[in-house]
Amino acid sequence: MSTIQFLSTSPEQLAELINEGVKTQLEAFKKDLHNKEAQDDLLTREQAANLLQIHETTLWHWTNKGRVTAYSIAGKRYYKRSEILGSLTELKK
């Protein structure tokens, strides 16, 4: 086990260092939370196929078979990122 010594550090300076560390961690947490909320954004067919690393015709087949859900706006198809990721299944080991 290692020992940390604070030489020439006042209690106020130590409190400020801890405060800055907590602020940094909270900012990182907020960014991560925002990224998770952004997972519900809409993807085009091309973006969804790229996300899954498949060809667009494969995505079309999977959509027709009900493996993934597509949404239509003005005749264009979109996919929800969260649903695409949610449709992935774990392989049995």
Image (cartoon, rainbow, N blue to C red):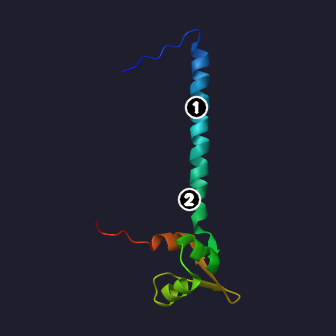
Image mark for residue 49: none
Give residue 91's position: percent from left, percent from top. Answer: 34, 69
Dot 1: within a 10 Å radius of its alpha carbon, few (fewer than 14), some, or many (20 or more) residues? Answer: few
Q: Amino acid at mark 2?
A: Lys
* In the rendered image, the vertical position of residue 66 relative to residue 15, given as above or below: below
The structure residue drawn at horizontal position 59% and vertical position 44%, both measured from the top left corner, is 28
3 vs 37, left or right, is: left
Residue 25 against residue 9 in the figure, above or below: below
Quarter of the image where the C terminus is located = bottom left
Label 2 neighbourhood size at 10 Å, few (<14), some (14-19), many (20+)?
Answer: few
Q: Position of residue 59 (x, y in %)?
A: 54, 83
Residue 36 has which mark?
2
Is 20 located above or below residue 6 in the figure?
below
Please provide percent x and percent y for residue 85. Answer: 49, 69
Taking depth in this image into account, of 49 and 38 the one nearest to the observer is 49
Left or right of 35 in this view: 91: left
Residue pointed to by mark 1: 21
**Residue furthest out toward the right:** 74
- Identify the secondary structure beneath mark 1: helix
Report whether residue 44 is seen: no
Q: In this rendering, is residue 43 above or below 14?
A: below
What's the residue type where badge 1 is placed? Answer: Gly
Query: Residue at position x 56%, y 46% from top?
Result: 29
Of 43 and 15, the residue lying toward us: 43
Residue depicted at 57% across the width and 53% down the height? 33
- Say whether residue 92 is visible: yes
Q: CA distance from mark 1 to mark 2?
A: 23 Å
Q: Residue at x 56, y 59 (%)?
A: 36
Residue 18 on image: x %, y %: 56, 26
Q: Secondary structure at mark 2?
A: helix
